[in-house]
Image: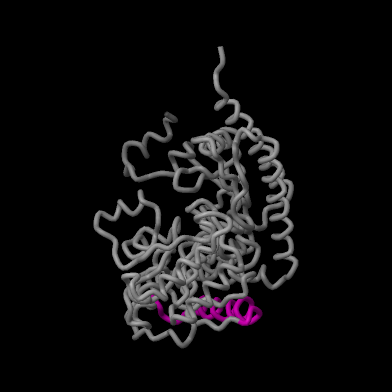
Amino acid sequence: MNKDLKVFENLESEVRSYCRSFPTVFTKAKGSIMWDKEGKEYIDFFCGAGALNYGHNDPNMKQKLVDYIMSDGITHSLDKATTPKQEFLTTFNDVILKPRDLDYKVMFPGPTGTNTVESALKLARKVTGRTEVITFTNGFHGMTIGSLSVTGNAFKRKGAGIPLHNAVTMPYDRYMDDTTDSLDYLEHYLEDGGSGVEVPAAVILETVQGEGGLNWASNKWLKRLEELCNRFDILLIIDDVQAGVGRTGTFFSFEPAGIKPDIVCMSKSIGGYGSPFAITLIKPEYDIWAPGEHNGTFRGNNHAFVTATEALKYWDDPAFEKAIHEKIEKVTSYLNRIVKDYPELDGYVKGRGLMQGISCGVEGIAEDVAAEAFKRGLIMETAGADDEVFKLFPAINMDNETLERGFDVIEESVKAAVAKNEPVTN
């Protein structure tokens, strides 16, 4: 083992995970490049699991943050009114919500993705007076008890240590096969008085399941789901923690479907710079919280307000979103070629936008590809119940040269993984 990692081995909890997949000590990062203690360069196709959509240390955000700190700007404020919060709310409304004809109240529930999910579940139950929540196969919504109850991964659910209740799992789009509409089952379930459970408070889902294996819901399926929710007076919650902020090509992942969720959960890249930050967007008619009914010590991260506001300025320019879509086309084309050129993967392309990857039919080969990529100076991770998908999460503003370099590294890694998995013959 690298001697520099011994301190982590000796002193840090066994629960650590990413430092096992990427066994080096990182010291510096800029844009889409990271460097370790030995000066080795790594292309980042991981982006903090979607928390760094704009890359590392964006110069505009960094300067705004440094200026704010040097001016003795407020860091911690609970939910007091501050200038950075005022500027964020105004900019978010003007740049993001109004142009998309969306009307939401903005709640600051705490700094992480699971905080926003917990607040959404609590509010949906308060609004409707019901307890059950419908979730979907392979969904992932966080690691606290409420969020785990609507998460599908058996390994993570087991970590709760107690039974997880008040959630009913339904099949996600194309869970059974490509021809069966899984919403037929959900509709029948809701209509049938003998299904065993009353109408739920809410439905929660990701439009693209990041941890669950890059499964994605079609626009038609999402639109029908919204119609079912409206018909049965169920709140629709979209968890856009990982798929939002341009990761799928539009600011919100649900925009192409033309739906307007009742509640939207956002975290990760909404802060722009990687600082802890989360928001819960609520249709005004459902914002029935009593003051202080849901709170948190770190719901007023002013440093994140500063960088989040600066990040939103990118979306003022239509060319920014256009450039994201151009990168998406490159990624899709590249992955389709890899599937064609390397049938040994027994793979197919999954996902949408800049959260795509290849699902491999050969056991363990996706993990081998990711490991080989790290050896060659590229950081990427796997997804799915059996880590069968190696996934590409480049920054949404990554330059084309770095993107192409990353493609080359991944292809070399695929070659190495395929060679490793070739059967030995006498």
Picture coordinates of residue 172 (x, y %)?
Answer: 49, 60
Picture coordinates of residue 281, whole percent (x, y): 49, 76
Q: Quadrant of residue 258?
A: bottom right
36 to 120, vertically: above or below: above
The overriding secondary structure of the stretch rendered in magenta is helix
Magenta stretch bounds: 77-101
Query: What residue occupies the far left of the structure in this picture?
Result: 162
Residue 193 on image: x %, y % = 35, 76
Q: Closest to the observer: 407 or 237?
A: 237
Could you say which is closer to the camera, residue 355 or residue 378? 355
Looking at the rendering, in which quadrant would you find the N terminus? top left
Image color mode: one colour
At x 57% / y 67%, what residue is drawn? 221
Instruction: Please name the residue shown 46% across and 68% down the image.
Output: 278
Taking the view exactly as shown, the residue that stands out farthest to the top is 426
Residue 388 at x, y = what percent? 51, 42
Which residue is most to the bottom? 285
* One can see residue 115 in this view: yes
Asked if the stretch drawn in magenta spans residue 158, the answer is no
Residue pictured at 69% horizontal, 45% vertical: 336
Q: Is residue 401 left or right of residue 380?
A: right
80 or 191: which is nearer to us? 191
- Tell whether 130 sits left or right of 221: left
The answer to whether residue 303 of the structure is visible from this angle is no
* Residue 152, above or below 93: above
